[in-house]
Amino acid sequence: MNQILKSNILARTLKSSIIALTLGFGSAALGADDSYKLGLQAYNKNDFTEAARHFEAALQKTQNDPLLWYYDALCYHHLKNWSMAKSRYKTTANSFPLTEPGRRAAAALKAIDPSFVPPKALAAATVSAQGERQPSNTQANNEKPADSKPTASADDAALDQELAGLPDSAHFYFKKSQQGHMEVDLMVNGHPVKAIFDTGASALFYKDQLKEAGLDLNRAKAGKGTRGWAGVEVSTEVMPAQIKLGTLTRTINIKMPESSNSLSTNLIGQDFIKGYQYEIDDKGGRVDLKKKLAAKQEKLNPLYDIPIEIIAGKEFIVFTVNSQYAKAFIDTGASNTIFDAFSAARFGAVPTGEVVHMSGVGGDLTMKRAYVNIRIGGMYRDNFPILIGGSGACALGQDLMEGWKYKVDRENKLLRFFH
């Protein structure tokens, strides 16, 4: 197949490519948002000359957005302005080789210029020890597993064996607290206990609350420490327990700090739903679980399917905050979206002076409120309130997901919104 034919085939796929990439990857051009939006509108009307003009204007305001370079290249590609298309593709591919726009630009450039040599990919970044100990950000009840994990092969084999005895699908209901947390009623070794469903945590239950519920804790053994947003390590004990939540009953190891305060709440999260995909109906107050083996391949909708990355058991997505790329994990246990101080400063989030006091694992802490512009796929939240503080990184809370029905599709690595 000659290069001109390859180029024409590629050109026919560009429009769907830009729509899918726009909504699935986000853009860092919020500082040039007006030009960016106008460019997309013109592009979708096949007015590529006008679209290129707006994208060029946006590039005058920000040079660190691979999507803008890529979109500009697509316009010139459609216009058959090969010199400009090659130039923009080359900038995208060479300057941002590890991003999705960079990879697509390299493929497009190779199709129209066989002499192009793609940049050598850098080694994949590993999760740092600090990232591995990042707390889960359940506002007043933050917990992050600090235990070391078995090897992936041993862990997978044990999980597969356990899942074989569990139902293919299950569900449970929750109620929203005044603070926005997902409160659930469950059974621990046959005793009723209240908790928060928190996908940013593993399974943490306070010993004094379990004793009050009538549990026998004589089998508890000393465990590793755990941390919350306060950043202070808290000692815990560990004990296997049978947890019944909705229609799923499962035996897992639970972590138990010694005592709680009036703001502390038990947490049930990743350890309980491990091996399942979960779909949350925020309005209906229901969570549906489905094994990967029971999941069916579904047609992707670029308007509502957002790529996710699984790191240390958490679901991370890429989005934009005030013209900058950001990565955060989805935390159903957090009523608010929270950034650590370093990330907030990098994204230009300016505290308003309003403070919010919290208390949880590791002690009390004070958060500062700020307002930012957030874009996740096709979801825009302008002047959106966030909290700044704590020892973690960035977590997306219930306030951002409020009113949506969404599914975390781990098999296809997508956050899927329904409307």
Image (cartoon, rainbow, N blue to C red):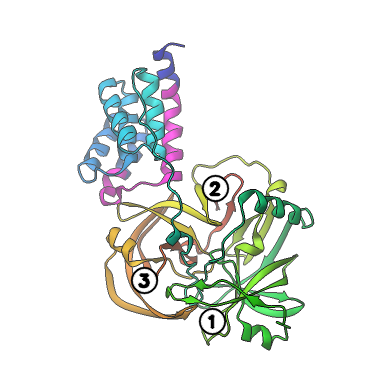
Distance from disc 2 to disc 3, alpha carbons, whole Å, reads 28 Å
Asked whether disc 3 touches disc 1, contact meaning CB atoms under 8 Å apart, the reply is: no
Neighbour tally class for label 2: few under 14, some 14-19, many 20 plus, Cα within 10 Å = many
Q: Which mark is residue 389?
A: 3
- Please name whichever residue, 287 or 389, is drawn nearer the observer in this view of the structure: 389
Residue 395 % position (x, y): 45, 63
- Please name whichever residue, 282 or 275, is drawn nearer the observer in this view of the structure: 275
Which of the 4 image quarters holds residue 336?
A: bottom left
Residue 206 % position (x, y): 60, 81
Q: Which residue is mark 2?
A: 414
Q: Which mark is residue 264?
A: 1
- Please name whichever residue, 275 or 221, is drawn nearer the observer in this view of the structure: 221
Q: How many marks?
A: 3
Question: Which residue is drawn at the image coordinates 48% and 60% (left, top)?
Answer: 132
| Mark in the foreground, 2 or 3 | 3
Neighbour tally class for label 1: few under 14, some 14-19, many 20 plus, Cα within 10 Å = many
Q: Amino acid at mark 2?
A: Leu
Distance from disc 1 to disc 2, alpha carbons, whole Å, reads 32 Å
**What stretch of residues is rendered in magenta?**
10-36
Report the side of 346 relative to 177 (left or right): left
Please determine whether, in this image, residue 398 is positioned above or below residue 195. above
